[in-house]
Image (cartoon, helix red, strand yellow):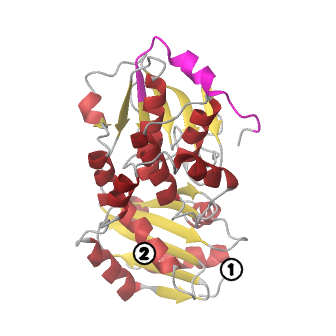
């Protein structure tokens, strides 16, 4: 994490006169969408027109509702492929280049604004502007830009930023810090409460019940660790929701949930133990067979298909043993 806080005016000056794209991580969640939208509207105040883009899909009802209710324009990579040029500027938001969850698009990544820790994979990447602060949500960083510039976000922007913060901190119960609380205090009087209520109601789809059912049926508990294999593909956001659901059990302090994907396994990890960093846990447990990383309280990762094939007929046993060994728990 940078010890010196960057000045948003530097990024504004860098972007002037250039075609700018704001790229979120693949399969963007509400925090990524809110942060990108807030930044786009901020830049527009300085006559900088920016296009929000992403790779993957909008795969969760909460994200889709956000785009619809707040009338936010985001474009998939294939929709902008013919327009983007090598010298166009890209600002990475809620992600960093080579973090494992963002596609390398054609343009020039000149900036990164993120609340996830930099890892060994991307520690040496240089940007013209870099703002990495380990807040509970990336939307908090964007909110601080408005405060620094003494600007008042529109009701739509304030709603998007507030919703992103609330979702990524699990209603201010996970990974929250003082800056997140200050951002809430700043945004709440400015947000459209009727719109916020619409966003927060009915965010579970009927198909999601299948994932909950698989979690209840397949959970295995080892001391304070709960581990679940969902034997079918489900969206990234749904895996995270199931991990939060497992963590809500009084016996569980660490939840590991993973599901099948055509290219391997997709993981979501949650930790409520101060001495267990979720990002380090998954990185260590999957070392040599996949990748992983994230925050102290929540992280994600994947295991490659070729690694699963090398495990033979019992890959679930191998996965479980890896997490137990990493936590020094008996099998």
Residue that mark 1 sits on: 328
**Vertical side of 318 occupied by 124: above or below:** above
Which residue corresponds to the image point at 66% horizontal and 76% vertical from the top-left?
327
What residue is shown at x 59% (from left), y 51% (from top)?
185
Does the segment drawn in magenta span residue 249? no
Question: Quadrant of the rendered structure where residue 314 is?
Answer: bottom left
Asked which secondary structure carries label 2, the reply is helix
Label 1: how many Cα within 10 Å (few below 14, some 14–19, many 20+): few
The 10 Å Cα crowd at callout 2, few under 14, some 14 to 19, many 20 or more, is: some
The residue lying at 25 percent from left, 34 percent from top is 78
Look at the image and tell me whether residue 57 can be seen: no
Question: In x, y percent, where is residue 49?
Answer: 39, 21
Residue 9 is covered by the magenta coloring: yes
| Residue 234 seen in the current view | yes
When the figure is inspected, residue 59 is found, relative to residue 124, above or below; the finding is: below
Q: CA distance from mark 2 to mark 1?
A: 20 Å
The answer to whether marks 2 and 1 mark residues whose Cβ atoms lie closer than 8 Å is no
Question: What is the quadrant of the N terminus in the image?
Answer: top right
Q: Position of residue 60 (x, y in %)?
A: 31, 58
Residue 30 screen position, x and y as percent: 41, 51
The percent position of residue 235, horizontal first and vertical second, equals 33, 61
Tell me the quadrant of the picture where the C terminus can be found. bottom right
Write down the residue under mark 2: 315
Which of 249/196 is in front?
196
Q: Is residue 115 above or below residue 329?
A: above
Q: For this rendering, which residue is in front, 308 or 34?
A: 34
- Span of residues in magenta: 3-21
**Mark before the other along the chain sequence, 2 or 1:** 2
* Side (left or right) of 171 relative to 238: right
């Amino acid at each position: 994490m940078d010890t010196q806080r960057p000045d948003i005016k530097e990024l504004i000056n860098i972007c002037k006169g250039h075609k700018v794209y704001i790229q979120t991580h693949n399969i963007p969640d509400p925090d990524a969408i809110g942060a990108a939208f807030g930044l786009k509207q901020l830049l527009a105040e300085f006559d900088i027109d920016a296009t929000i883009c992403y790779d993957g899909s909008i795969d969760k009802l909460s994200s889709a509702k956000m785009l619809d209710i707040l009338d936010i324009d985001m474009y998939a990579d294939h929709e902008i492929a013919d327009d983007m040029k090598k010298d166009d500027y890209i600002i990475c938001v809620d992600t960093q280049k080579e973090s494992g969850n963002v596609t390398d698009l054609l343009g020039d990544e000149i900036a990164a604004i993120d609340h996830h820790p930099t890892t060994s994979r991307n520690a040496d990447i240089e940007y013209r502007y870099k703002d990495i602060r380990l807040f509970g949500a990336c939307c908090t960083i964007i909110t601080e830009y408005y405060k620094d510039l003494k600007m008042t976000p529109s009701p739509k922007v304030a709603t998007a930023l507030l919703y992103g913060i609330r979702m990524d901190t699990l209603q201010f119960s996970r990974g929250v810090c003082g800056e997140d609380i200050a951002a809430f205090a700043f945004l709440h009087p400015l947000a459209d409460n009727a719109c916020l209520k619409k966003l927060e109601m009915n965010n579970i789809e009927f198909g999601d019940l299948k994932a909950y059912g698989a979690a209840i049926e397949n959970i295995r508990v080892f001391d304070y660790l709960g581990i679940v294999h969902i034997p079918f593909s489900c969206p990234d956001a749904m895996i995270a929701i199931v991990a939060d659901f497992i963590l809500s059990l009084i016996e569980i302090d660490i939840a590991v949930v993973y599901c099948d994907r055509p290219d391997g396994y997709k993981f979501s990890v949650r930790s409520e133990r101060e001495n267990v960093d979720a990002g380090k846990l998954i990185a260590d447990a999957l070392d040599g067979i996949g990748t992983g990383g994230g925050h102290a309280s929540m992280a994600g990762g994947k295991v490659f298909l070729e690694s699963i094939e090398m495990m033979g007929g019992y890959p679930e046993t191998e996965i479980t043993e890896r997490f137990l060994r990493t936590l020094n728990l008996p099998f």
